[in-house]
Amino acid sequence: MHTTAFLRTFAGINGSLNMNTDIPQSKLLNVNGRLLDLSTPCVMGILNVTPDSFYAGSRMQTEADIAARVRQIVAEGAAIIDVGAYSSRPDAADVSAAEEMERLRRGLSTLRREAPDAVVSVDTFRADVARMCVEEYGVAIINDISAGELDEDMFATVARLGVPYVMMHMQGTPQSMQHAPHYEDDVLAVMMQYFARRVQQFRDLGGKDIILDPGFGFGKTLEHNYRLLAHLEEFAMFGLPLLVGVSRKSMVYRLLQVEPADALNGTTALHTVALMKGADILRVHDVRQAMEVIQVVEALRRQEPIDD
């Protein structure tokens, strides 16, 4: 089915997902009993406790480095700190659940000392890891690159924990996702169908707060990524908060033929586009710069239209 026709049909028939585009998108998340207001977009600052994340500047290994990064993220204004202990860059080495938990315990212990009241999310696709982080460290959000595909217990686990869930689309696994990614239909239509199905499955198990993430760079070509960004506003039909993670990714540095370390300017351009098209959360390496983009875009939105 042609993408435009599919989207119209999808919006009309899937009432169970609150597809009436006249109904305002939910902008409140329950995080540890507090409400996180997304009526103004916010920043999720990346804290990688990995030795092999794609952007070398984000790798925090020692307790001192982790503490300094936490202080920086908080000082620069991020609303959420996203902690990752399993690199999901293309062709990354697999890491055992035990190693992932050990890294996270080290990182979360330091984080809680430095910022005990911070809203923390953990980037993991494993249900046991998610449960440990929520129960032992009060983690408020689970950020799953696989939308429950890599661990069949994830949906039920997150539903029982009662925390918000970032549901990201990925084709394949981190080890295989960029090996000639291909879609039988338009990538946008495929993802709309995918999220419709996965959101309903999560809700059927009792899951509540859902954040959608298109998964830029996860099983997608450069063309796929820019196709999704060009039509990002279509995701508003789900009535769910939208997270965008494009920070220093290959869709920036390969297009511009630079290294990730030199991809901040291109990232800022993409953040501006994403915000103008409805992004609620920017997941970033560079918090201060992303906060400035939000400030600029919000100033534009406050301008009154010119009367005819």
Image (cartoon, rainbow, N blue to C red):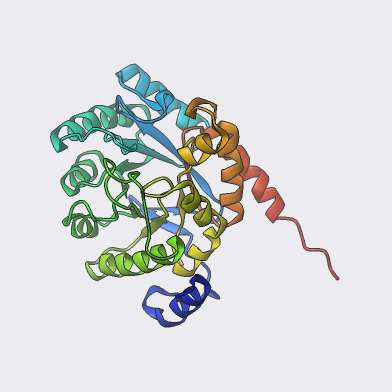
Tell me the quadrant of the picture where the C terminus can be found. bottom right
Residue at 28% of width from left, 32% of height from top? 108
Residue at 75% of width from left, 56% of height from top? 303
Above or below, 143 against 199 in this view is above
Which x, y percent locates residue 243? Answer: 45, 51
Which x, y percent locates residue 44? Answer: 45, 41
> Considering depth in this image, is 94 or 207 the residue closer to the camera?
94
Q: How many marks?
A: 0
Q: Quadrant of residue 203?
A: bottom left
> Considering depth in this image, is 143 or 232 the residue closer to the camera?
232
> Considering depth in this image, is 58 or 107 the residue closer to the camera?
58
Residue 308 relative to residue 134: left or right = right
Q: Quadrant of residue 1?
A: bottom left
Which x, y percent locates residue 99? Answer: 17, 31
Residue 56 relative to residue 99: left or right = right
Which x, y percent locates residue 106? Answer: 24, 27
Which residue is situated farthest in the right direction here? 308
Residue at 31% of width from left, 21% of height from top? 61
Above or below, 137 against 302 in this view is above
Residue 227 relative to residue 14: left or right = right
Residue at 15% of width from left, 46% of height from top? 128
